[in-house]
Image (cartoon, rainbow, N blue to C red):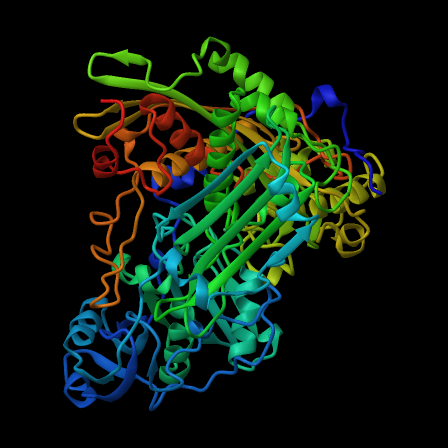
Amino acid sequence: MTTATTGRSAADRVTGTAHTRVEGRDKVTGAARYAAEIPFAELAHGWLVLSTVARGRVRGLDTDAVLAMPGVLTVLTHHNAPRVDTDFVGMMGVPPDPGTALFQHDRVPHRGWPVALVVAETSEQAREAAETLVVHYDEEPHDVAFSAGRAAEAYPVDGHMPAVVEKGDLDRELAASAVVVDAEYTTPEEHHNPMEPHAATARWEGGRLEVVDSNQGTHWVAGDLANLFSLDPGTVRVRSEHVGGGFGSKGVRAHQVAAVMAATVLHRPVRVVMTRRQMFSLAGYRSPTAQRVRLGADPDGRLRALEHRSLNQTSTVHEFVEPSAAAGRSMYAADAHHTVSRLVRLDVPTPTWMRAPGEAPGSFALESALDELAEKCGVDPIDLRLRNEPAVGPVSGLPFAGRNLVACFREGARRFGWAERDPRPGVRREGRWLLGTGTAAASFPAMAMPSTASVTAEADGTFTVRINAADIGTGARTALTLIAADALDVPTDRVLVRIGDSDLGPAMVAGGSAGTRSWAWAVTAAAEELRRGLAPGADIPPQGITVRSDTTEAVGALTQKERHSFGAQFAEVAVDPATGEIRVRRMLGVFAAGRIVNPLTARNQLVGGMIWGLSMALHEEAVRDPASGGVYGADLAGYHVAAHADVPHVEADWVDDPDPDDPVGIKGIGEVGIVGAAAAIANAVWHATGVRHRDLPIRPDRILSAGGDA
Ligand code: MOS
C-alpha cells in the first residue's frame, strides 16, 4: 500500500489550507468561457424538437415547409439521421441510455423525447423553424402515475448497488421487538437544474471529431461518442474546460449526439444547447421514491431488525435504479437486515444519478424512522444512533476505513447546543412560531477509481500537471494544484494544472464523490516520482521532463473495507401553524470525510449539499401532469429551489478523519452534505409541531392539512 510521502513536512503543507480558486479571477471577470460561449467560424445552430405526446409513434413530419424557412440548413429525423450503435457497455460500465440514440426509429417512449433537430445559420432561425415544425403522431394511451401502490408491478434490479441484501430472520426479530416502527415515506421527482444548461459544439477537424462540451468527464463522453458512432477512440476529442454545475446530469446526453450528427451531415461546426425547459425531459432527474421502513428494537432502542424497501420509477427504454434502501446496509447494527430497491416502468424519461443517488432520498426515510423510534423508546435521537453503532459493517462484516460518526455527533451536539433541548415536541414557542430542532446521520461511499496523470518539470522552473479531471464547480482544479505543490515541494504559483480534455488520457469522472481522491492519487504518484528523479540544480531540457502515472494497479490493490464519509446533521426550524410557513433558522453539519484538501472549497461543497437538503425538504417537487405526461411548470419559476431568502445560517465543519489507505488521506465530500439534511429538517418540524411529515417536500398546505398542535 502506498503511504503518505508528500514532499514536505506536515507543517509546511498547503493541502489543508484555504486557497481561493485558481480560475476564480477568470470566472468573475468573464474571461472563463463556458461551452456555449466559445466562438467557432462557420458555426451552425441546432434546435431540438421534442415530442408533445407521451407515447406512440411519429407518423410524419412536415419538414419541407421548415426547410424553406430563412437560414435553415437541414432537419434531422429518424428518416435521415446517421445510424448509431448502442450495443456496447458504456464508459461507466453500464449500457448507454437509449435516450442518447437519437432519431433511430419512430417510437416515442415519453413526452419530451427528441423527434427532430432543426439546424440553421443562427440560433434564432433554428428555434423559429423548430417551433414551426408540425409533427404528426399516432398517439397511444400513456401511464406516468407513480405511487407506492405500484409495488405489485415492481421488480428488483441491481444498479450501482445490489438490489436485494438480506441478513438474518426479519420476521423473527420483528416479532421479538418490544418497539416497532413501520412507516411509509415518499420523495418527489427532483431535477438537477445546474446553472449552466447542457451545451455542445461538434466539428470535424483534420480527420478528428472535436466536441466542446459541458460535462463531468471528457474521457467518458468521448468514449461513449466513439462507441455510438463506431469511431476509433483516438479520433474523438472532447473538451470541457469550465462547467457550471452537473450533479450527475452531465454525461452523454442528446445534445452532444445531435451536434455530432449535424456536424457530420453538414461538414461544419454545429452547436446544440438545451433550454431550461428541455432539460426537464433531456437531462435526467431523480426518480420519485416510495419507501417503507420497518425498525424493530428493544426498549432501550437497540435495533433487532432493519427493513428498508424502496420503489422508484424508470422509463420503458432503460432501467435506472435509485438505490434508496442501500444506505442502511453500512449504517446501523441489527440482527436482521433486509433492504431492497425495486423499479416500476412508466412512460417517463429515464432518471439518472443525482447528487447522492440513493442516499439522499433513502436517508430521508431511514433517518426519519430512527427519529420515530427514538420518540417511541423515549431515547434521545443521538443516543439512539450511538447505541446502534456497528463495530464492523453490519451486513458485510468488513472493517471500517475510519468511522468517526460518533465524533461528528459529539462535536455537532456541543456546537449546536443539543444538551439544552427539551425532548418533548410542540413546547417551544416564540410568538406565532413553534420552534424545534432535529438531527440525522449522513453517509456516502468513499471510492477511488483508476486514473492517469502526467507531471512535467518545465525549463522555466514551473510544473505542468496534466490530469483529465473535471471541475464542475467543486474547486477540483484548485485542490489538485495544492496536492501537486505538496508532492513537488514547490509553491502553488509554480504549478499549472490542466484538466477537462480527453486527450489528457483516462481518468475518473467528477462523480461518485470520488473525483478529487482518484485524481489526487494519480497526481501524487507522478509528482513524487518526478521530484525523486530530479537532481537539485539539474538542467531541464526545453521540452521539460515528464513523468506519467497510472493508478489502476494501486487502486485495484485496495483492501476490501467499508469505506464511507460520515456526518451529523442538525437543523432548527420555526413553523407557523396558522399559515403553514416553515423557516429553517440554522443548520450545522459536522462531517468525517477524509483529509480536507482545501477548506474553502470543501466548506462550499458541504454547505451546498446541505442547502440542497433544505431545498429537498421544503421546496423541490416536479409534478407530472397525468394528461400530458410532462412536468407542470418545467422551468425555474414552476420548479421551486431554495433561494437566498430561504437559506439561514448554515455551518459545515469536520473532524479529523484521514483515510488510512489513501496516499493523501482523502475520502470524498461531493455528496455527503445533502445526505440526512432533509431528515434533520423533517425531524425538527416534528419537534416543533408534534406532527410527523413523511412526504417531501413539507409544503405549507401539508402543515395546514396535518393539523397538530396549533
Ligand atoms: Mo454525481 S450524482 O456522482 O454527479
**Can residue 394 be seen in this snapshot?**
yes
In this rendering, the answer to whether 302 lies above or below 159 is above
Q: Residue at x 51, y 32 (%)?
A: 601
Q: Position of residue 580 (x, y in %)?
A: 21, 30
Q: Position of residue 448 (x, y in %)?
A: 68, 48
**On the rendered structure, is 518 left or right of 122?**
right
In-front residue for pair 563/603 = 563
Q: Quadrant of the N terminus?
A: top right
Q: Residue at x 31, y 63 (%)?
A: 145
Q: Position of residue 437 (x, y in %)?
A: 40, 21
Q: Residue at x 16, y 82 (%)?
A: 134
Q: Quadrant of the C terminus?
A: top left
**On the rendered structure, is 661 left or right of 28?**
right
In-front residue for pair 703/515 = 703
In this rendering, the answer to whether 36 lies above or below 621 is below
**On the rendered structure, is 161 left or right of 240?**
right
In-front residue for pair 205/338 = 338
**On the rendered structure, is 315 left or right of 395?**
left
